[in-house]
Image: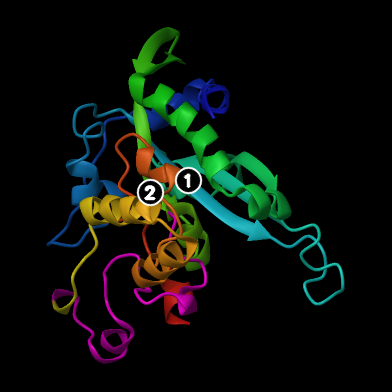
Amino acid sequence: MVQSIKQFLDNDHIARMVFQTPKYSTVDGFLLDIIDGSVFKDHEIFSAFETSLQILLYYDDVEICNPLGKKAGTHKIGVFYYSIANMPKLYRSRLPCIRLLSIVKRKVMNEYGIKHVLERINTDLIEISQGINIMINGEVKLVKGAVIAFIGDTLAIHEVCGFKVGVGFAYQKCRECECTPADLQTKFREDLFLKRNLQSYDDQCQELDRAVTRGMRNHLSRIYGINERSYARDFPGFNLLTNTPEDIMHVLF
């Protein structure tokens, strides 16, 4: 990722757009951009360095063959992308601004887990958080950055964050709160639920690791809705509970 970012910002015009001072756009209490929210303003890196890189990560699976054919799943791949949210909103969704980060065969991730991919991504993110040298207007500057959001549908983000992908097998199905199946169907206000937090996430992951039998571990995994501790938990300045926005279309439809 580090080398790719350097190549992307090698263009002076792009570098000037990326490293301009953030302009907050809150109007009458409405949040109009990602930098208007508390996740950005309270971030340990973004709050300290105005021109820091705001990295957006995206992950999803792609079926290469006919999904209804006999080869379905055989050549399925997992694709990771990144983009820079510092870009003006006009350009963020343009294909030249969406950069390929990694392609992994789905059957390889099924066998070894997504954690090895996230561990490799984390290595680059640690380097970026400590600062990388970028040429800007003919001058080398030390630039820091972090992931401001990891984007994907519900299944993808649950896998990234270590939660159960098939939530039907979990007692606590939501990655944002610890609601029961009954409450999920009858309560519709946020204040009626106990929200998850990083401390409870870490405690529950430790309980899974300390389970003395496979049966006990599977029981705790179903209760908490967690398969394993995610390497995304170690991303610098990244909160895997608040920096993973919901896919509204996937949730509603």
Q: Residue at x 77, y 72 (%)?
A: 67
Where does the image place residue 87, in percent across and percent down from the top left?
Answer: 42, 39
Q: Is residue 92 visible?
A: yes
Q: Residue at x 19, y 81 (%)?
A: 189
Where does the image place residue 148, in percent across and percent down from the top left?
Answer: 35, 44
Please give the range of residues in magenta.
Answer: 162-191
Q: Is residue 108 above or below residue 49?
A: below
Q: Is residue 250 above or below residue 207?
A: below
Marks 2/1 in contact by CB < 8 Å: the verdict is yes
From the viewer's perspective, tell me whether residue 126 is left or right of residue 33. Answer: right
Residue 167: within the magenta? yes
Q: Is residue 32 above or below residue 165?
A: above
Element assignment for label 2: strand
Q: Residue at x 19, y 62 (%)?
A: 30
> Which residue is at the far bottom?
186
Quadrant, the N terminus: top right
Residue 166: within the magenta? yes
For label 2, the crowd category at 10 Å Cα-Cα, with few meaning under 14, some 14 to 19 and many 20 or more, is many
Element assignment for label 1: strand
Q: Which residue is mark 1?
A: 57
Q: Residue at x 36, y 30 (%)?
A: 145
Q: Which residue is mark 2?
A: 149
* Three-letter code for the amino acid on which mark 2 is drawn: Ala
Where does the image place residue 238, in percent across and percent down from the top left?
Answer: 32, 42
